[in-house]
Image: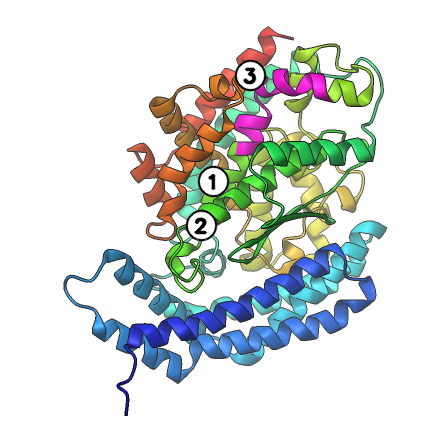
Amino acid sequence: MPAAAPALDQLQHHLHTTRLLGSISSTLYYDQNTVMPAAGAAWRGEQLALLAAQLHERQSSAAYADLVAAAEAELTADAPPQRRRNLQLLRLELDRQCCLDPALVSALARAQSHGNAVWQQARAANDFSAFAPALRQLIALRREQAGQLAAAEPVARSPWEILAQPFEPDISKARLQELFAPLAAQLPGLLEQVAAAPAPSPTQAFDLPEALQESLCSELLDGWGYDGRRCQRSRSAHPFSCTVGPEDFRITTRVVRGQPLSAFLATAHEWGHSLYEQGLPRSDDHFFPWPLGEATSMGVHESQSLFWECRVARSRAFAERWHPRFRQGLGSDPWGGVQGFWRSFNPLRPGLIRVEADELSYSLHIVLRFELELALLEQELPVEELPGQWNRRFKDLLGLVPPSDAEGCLQDIHWAEGLFGYFPSYALGHLISAQISEALEQQIGPIEALVRAGQESALQEWLARSVWPLGRSVNAEQLVEQVTGRPLSSEAFLTYLRAKVGQLAEGA
């Protein structure tokens, strides 16, 4: 009778099947947000609930627990640190999954699918009341989930902090407030500074034809390493990036009427996410069963997308290279030259929509959502009061009042899927991107110079050496300290913003 396979091999086989089920779920999600007819939402919810239940069972069963324990027992003193870290992460996730009621897992999957579908309809109809029951249900389910997961947490955490752990491991409300306080203190002054300068505006009213926007987005991706054999770009109500398999990377964008640069910048942003996914460490199994091949946090993920959107696509050097192509495609120059074109990518004016926000006001959008999530989950804010609270706080932070809920509390998909705890990762991404950019420039030179020379490949190569291979070997703050040599702070981001405001003001 042949000897039993080593526990680590048995565990890898188990994880491979688990990842296959997860990738099927990702495929269904991508389909739901791109081409699925609206009437298919209920059945899609049942499909996703079934897969969620099966995944939960595989990740919490006694047989799986035995495999993890046996693999841990096989560890020797000289075992590679990567293997030790992989098993540590698997144990953490196993403990969390074992705390969850399978019925709750299925109910959450159904509620998320339902919330997504209802949100799309409610947003299109500007009807928050149609979405409110779905949101109320998701809040209740997520509170229940946080209560169940509390037993597996190594330290005491609030419900919001527990829900934030999958997105930002080891994060706390206190640490976020420490990082965000300098932004809240200094960003309003910078906004006042740019408000005193003439607002950037085209010399004539215009909009880029949809076909031209699609063509420009394709050209951008082609120049940044898009491989049609492994990648796909589609359209969705909200731009996102999705990894379906080890050689299957998807992104989506959208064309927004009256926002001629939106699709182009969204493409740069989502491709940054995809580049990070494509650069994560791979094993012989294409990175798929082992946790080290996953993103360490959504803050790091966002830092990569914001790097390509803001540090590259919004740079003066990039505007110089792309202005002739935009002008040629449109047949005119409504920007009145390169300076106007660059300023159109950097309006530095508060706006209503987060994904269209400039780098100055963006973090204030996140502060708003962070505060409202805490109010909904931990401070008993009634769901029906959300639109009013959103509008009042938006006016306090950004001086604007949304004319509709579609441009207010209905604009983001995250709450429609119960993704509470995600939003701070966007602001953390700005901080991480700025600090990593300083380290990059110290080693290979100014980003502007490399972009002006058309050498974005050098930027990709540095990230591929310095950031992407770390995967989940460290958490976000450890990654930043390892790459940059100092703890994460808001200093680099604020320094970058002050310099950019000065440059834009000089050319006004």
Q: Residues within 10 Å of mark 1 (few under 14, many from 20)?
A: many
Q: Residue 228, percent across and down?
A: 63, 46
Q: Is residue 99 visible?
A: no
Q: Residue 357, percent across and down?
A: 65, 32
* Residue 43 on the magenta segment: no
User: What span is in magenta?
Assistant: 308-325
Q: Compute the Cα span from label 2 to label 1.
A: 10 Å
**For this rendering, which residue is in front, 94 or 187?**
94
Q: Which numbered marker is on residue 428?
A: 1
Q: Compute the Cα span from label 2 to label 3.
A: 29 Å
Q: Which numbered marker is on residue 484?
A: none
Asked if marks 2 and 3 touch (Cβ < 8 Å), the reply is: no
Asked if residue 248 is positioned above or below residue 67 in the image, the reply reads: above
Instruction: Tell me: 374 left or right of 406.
Output: left
Q: Residue 236, percent across and down?
A: 73, 49
Question: For the N terminus, which image quadrant?
Answer: bottom left
Instruction: Tell me: 358 left or right of 448.
Output: right
